[in-house]
Image (cartoon, rainbow, N blue to C red):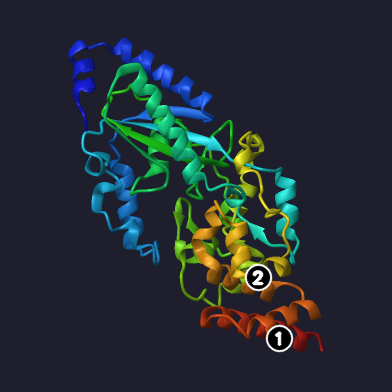
Amino acid sequence: MNTNTTLTYEQQGNRQALSALAAKIKQWGQELGFAEVAFSDTDLPEAEQHLAAWLAKDFHGEMDYMQRHGNKRSRPALLQPGTVSIISVRMDYLPEAASAMQANLDAPTAAYISRYALGRDYHKLMRNRLQKLADKIQAEIGAFGYRAFVDSAPVLEKAIAEKAGLGWIGKHSNLINRKAGSWFFLGEIYTDLPLPSDQPTSAHCGDCMACLAICPTQAIVAPYQVDARRCVSYLTIELHGAIPEDLRPLIGNRIYGCDDCQLVCPWNRFAKLTGEGDFHPRHRLNTQQLLAVFAWTEAEFLAKTEGSAIRRIGYERWLRNIAVALGNAPSSPELLAALQAKMADTSELVKEHVLWALRQHEKNKDRLS
């Protein structure tokens, strides 16, 4: 990193100049569409201990990248040398009212997709905005050292945002903001500028255990502890192989991610609908039916998920997830025909889940006869 700017500020001892710059950064951030901008230092000892304990329990499952980088995740200066402070931002993404989401989730033949993934991939959009924010800072003060992140490197984004005062980490492990709930993305700029840190906020979950109770697979094994190996988001997105059979019936109609813990969180009554058009649903992904998306060819899948976070799971896992959801849906001749037709030309992974779905319907038929 270039440390000339940092040294200049330190030599001047001009805290007032740094405070003025911080105020401008917050204003620029809001002009670029961020709901909030805040600053923190790089000291994260408690988060480091929490991560180590989580990894020791193997709660990360097959997400080997969570332990691959040693302490770089919890010690920002190891990841980006010269980092002395972090600019943390959040951007609202809620595309529709909670009632519409719940109606989609409650319809067993509908395909439920986590609401963060309905529109354009947030990684690209937010990274572009963070770069524009960095450009504005550089235009104001000259060259400085920085690196921007949006869920793209070993960064403890929630712990950093919590320290910056953007919210507190709830019992479901998501960040909650008292005035905006939890339907937002996070991003960071690591920098060599010694910006004044904002104050962390206090936690306000109290005795509430709603998120633990609602989790369909009971993945929140204790307050602030999520066993990813049971989490629907992990099972439908991160897991590459077969979904454990005992968890398949619990997934319901969730084919990409899960929002249950956010839907039930009382703080989300303060959540605001996003003003960012790119986060609005594309290709009616918020109202698609299971049979419709199961019928997509690979070319259709690629076309309709272009620029979307959904594409990262690939067509095979997409079909795997839908097959499980169809196994949990009410039987119908159309549904059974769609499952049987998929057996003719698909991978062994998908076939396994299609066969499971067919067996589920056969079991239900036997129970009713």
Pinpoint residue 191: horizontal percent, then vertical percent.
30, 31
Taking the spot 53% from the left edge, 59% from the top edge, the residue there is: 311
Residue 72 vs residue 52, the one in the foreground: 72
The residue under label 2 is which amino acid type? Ala
Q: Give the label, 1 or 2, closer to the camera.
A: 2
Res. 207 image quadrant: top right
Q: Is residue 290 above or below residue 134?
A: below
Q: What amino acid is at disc 1?
A: Lys
The answer to which image quadrant residue 15 occupies is top left
Q: Is residue 212 above or below residue 86?
A: below
The residue tagged 2 is 325
Q: Quadrant of the C terminus?
A: bottom right
Q: Quadrant of residue 3?
A: top left
Residue holding disc 1: 363
- The location of residue 121, given as percent across then percent down, is 53, 48
CB under 8 Å between callouts 1 and 2? no
Q: Is residue 10 left or right of residue 207?
A: left
Name the side, left or right, on which 287 lies relative to 33: right
Residue 343's spot in the image, x, y percent? 63, 84
- Identity of the residue drawn at 34% across and 63% down: 64
In what element is the residue under mark 2? helix
Q: Residues within 10 Å of mark 2 (few under 14, many from 20)?
A: many
Q: Quadrant of the N terminus?
A: top left
Against 218, residue 355 (above or below) is: below
Q: Nearer the viewer, residue 247 or 257?
A: 257
Q: Earlier in the sequence, mark 1 or mark 2?
A: 2
> Residue 332: in sight, yes or no?
no
Q: Nearer the viewer, residue 263 or 186?
A: 186
SS type, badge 1: helix
- Mark 1 closeness class: few <14, some 14–19, many ≥20 residues within 10 Å: few
Seen in the picture, residue 49 relative to 273 is either above or below; the reply is below
11 relative position to 217: left or right: left
